[in-house]
Image (spheres, rainbow, N blue to C red):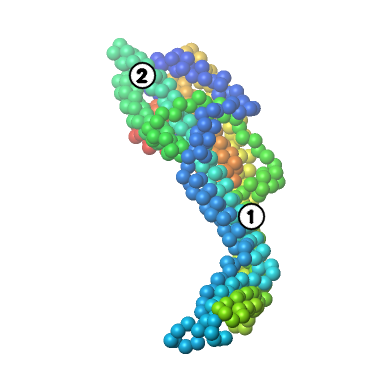
């Protein structure tokens, strides 16, 4: 927000006509509701460039490839063992061909796991690879959401700069009029001093907003791997963004559960643990090893060998492996349920926020801004005929300007909730404060009207320091 007190007022009486002219132009655009989204090629290009260039995505793709390459490794037979040797009688000379117990030896041994073990290992590895694909999808969704949020922040900063520019122009004119009235003795010097003070404060806030704008440009350029200071032109403002739809709770929940990478990864993890448990149970059965060999004996008849080896599961490791598998299966099932519950909570939180924010935005468009502008016009007309004090007009004007900035904040917060919906985020819902209740306004004046409504002419001077800028 721009100010701690959004009801501080402008200072120069003769500036009323200029102010009304300055406010009349944008009102129809602010009051008009937009049902469909205008295309934004800038945003789509930024998203596309980020998805093509982010190293996090390349890293996640490599991890998926690594997980996929593991599947054929664990699903195939172990490599055979080739054994070469010689058996000889005595140490004085080679007796092959002369002694029956002397020969060359060539043997090949092939390990054979119990049927089903290789299939369970391959199934578990394939499910882990699918979990890696879910992680890749999470990175993709997060990169896109980061771009959309940074772009939204950029639009908000630029819209506030435009609002600040309008305010600076009005304050410059009001300072000139205040100086003229003071020189002719028709106005107090305090009006001129307050106008000059507000111009100085506006310059300070402009520096903060320009720094915010540069930061958002740099963030977008980082996301798309471009030079940080490369300019980014925008074609839309926050006011032109459509209101996001508010789906039914069950529809939103079903959509989130079908697209959530975390839930998919948890589901694949549980299924992989089930295959691992099946494998642990199958480990109770022995593995085999088939050996075939030939023993040439020179001039004597060659010998040959065929044998079968079998493992003996006699030390009880397999029963502990089954218990481990059962514990891991329960853990992954509980983890999946925990993710599902958290996802449903986030969906419902965003539904509640959208249900609260959308009427606020619609109220700004269809009622608040229109009524605020009408109040400014009516109060100004009554001031011209001497029915109200200048403080009343300035209060109405400051309220209108605060409503414009509150409108921008409400749109920004609504769009953030929609981005989180699209991202299927598990982060807590909510954002910057003040979205539901409006916000401050840059340079909203230097005269404060007492709370509770004072009688005409009872306005009091309340010089306040410039409040720090904060973004939503």
Give the quarter of the figure containing the N terminus: top left
Position of residue 230 measured from the top left corner of the image (x, y, whole percent): 40, 31
Q: Residues within 10 Å of mark 1 (few under 14, many from 20)?
A: many
Q: Nearer the viewer, residue 412 or 96?
A: 96
Where does label 2 land, which residue? 172
Q: Nearer the viewer, residue 127 or 415?
A: 127
Residue 197 vertical position relative to residue 187 in the rendered view, above or below: below
Q: Nearer the viewer, residue 221 or 151?
A: 221
Position of residue 456 measured from the top left corner of the image (x, y, whole percent): 45, 23
Comparing marks 2 and 1, which lies closer to the viewer? 1
Any part of residue 458 in sight: no
Q: Nearer the viewer, residue 407 or 46?
A: 46
Among the 4 quarters of the image, the one containing residue 248 = top right
Where does label 1 land, which residue? 340
Q: Outermost residue toward the left?
A: 183
Residue at position x 52%, y 74% in the image = 84
Q: Outermost residue toward the bottom?
A: 90
Position of residue 183 measured from the top left corner of the image (x, y, whole percent): 29, 13
Badge 2 marks a residue whose secondary structure is helix
Residue at position x 54%, y 85% in the image = 98
Disc 2/disc 1 C-alpha distance (Å): 57 Å
- Which label's residue is closer to the chain start, 2 or 1? 2
Position of residue 327 measured from the top left corner of the image (x, y, whole percent): 61, 70
Any part of residue 52 in sight: yes
């Amino acid at each position: 927000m721009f100010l701690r007190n959004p009801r501080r007022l402008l200072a120069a009486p003769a500036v009323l006509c200029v102010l009304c002219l300055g406010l009349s132009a944008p009102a129809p655009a602010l009051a008009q509701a937009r049902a469909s989204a205008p295309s934004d090629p800038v945003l789509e290009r930024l998203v596309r460039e980020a998805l093509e260039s982010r190293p996090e995505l390349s890293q996640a793709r490599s991890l998926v490839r690594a997980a996929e390459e593991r599947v054929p490794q664990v699903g195939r037979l172990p490599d055979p063992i080739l054994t070469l040797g010689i058996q000889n009688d005595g140490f004085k000379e080679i007796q092959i061909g002369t002694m029956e117990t002397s020969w060359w030896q060539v043997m090949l041994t092939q390990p054979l796991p119990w049927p089903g073990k290789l299939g369970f290992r391959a199934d578990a590895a394939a499910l882990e690879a699918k979990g890696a694909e879910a992680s890749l999808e999470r990175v993709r969704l997060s990169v896109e959401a980061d771009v959309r949020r940074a772009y939204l922040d950029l639009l908000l900063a630029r819209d506030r700069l435009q609002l600040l520019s309008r305010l600076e122009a009005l304050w410059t004119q009001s300072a000139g009029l205040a100086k003229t009235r003071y020189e002719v003795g028709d106005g107090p010097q305090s009006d001129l001093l307050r106008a000059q003070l507000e111009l100085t404060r506006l310059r300070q806030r402009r520096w903060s907003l320009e720094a915010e704008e540069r930061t958002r440009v740099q963030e977008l350029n980082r996301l798309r791997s471009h030079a940080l200071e490369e300019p980014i032109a925008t074609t839309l403002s926050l006011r032109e963004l459509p209101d996001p739809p508010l789906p039914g709770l069950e529809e939103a929940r079903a959509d989130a559960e079908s697209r959530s990478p975390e839930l998919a990864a948890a589901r694949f993890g549980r299924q992989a643990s089930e295959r691992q448990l099946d494998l642990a149970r199958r480990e109770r059965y022995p593995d085999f090893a088939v050996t075939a060999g030939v023993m040439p004996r020179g001039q004597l008849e060659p010998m040959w060998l065929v044998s079968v080896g079998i493992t003996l599961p006699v030390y009880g490791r397999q029963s502990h492996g089954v218990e481990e598998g059962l514990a891991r299966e329960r853990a992954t099932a509980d983890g999946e349920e925990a993710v599902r519950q958290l996802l449903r909570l986030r969906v419902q939180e965003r539904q509640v926020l959208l249900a609260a924010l959308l009427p606020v935005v619609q109220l700004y468009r269809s009622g608040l801004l229109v009524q605020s502008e009408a109040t400014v016009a009516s109060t100004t007309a009554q001031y011209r005929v001497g029915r109200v004090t200048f403080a009343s007009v300035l209060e109405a004007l400051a309220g209108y300007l605060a409503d414009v900035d509150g409108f921008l904040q409400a749109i920004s917060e609504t769009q953030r909730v929609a981005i989180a919906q699209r991202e299927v985020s598990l982060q807590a819902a909510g954002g910057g404060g003040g979205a539901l209740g409006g916000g401050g306004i840059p340079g909203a004046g230097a005269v404060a009207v007492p709370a509770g409504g004072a009688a005409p002419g009872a306005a009091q001077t309340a010089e306040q320091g410039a409040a720090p800028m904060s973004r939503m």
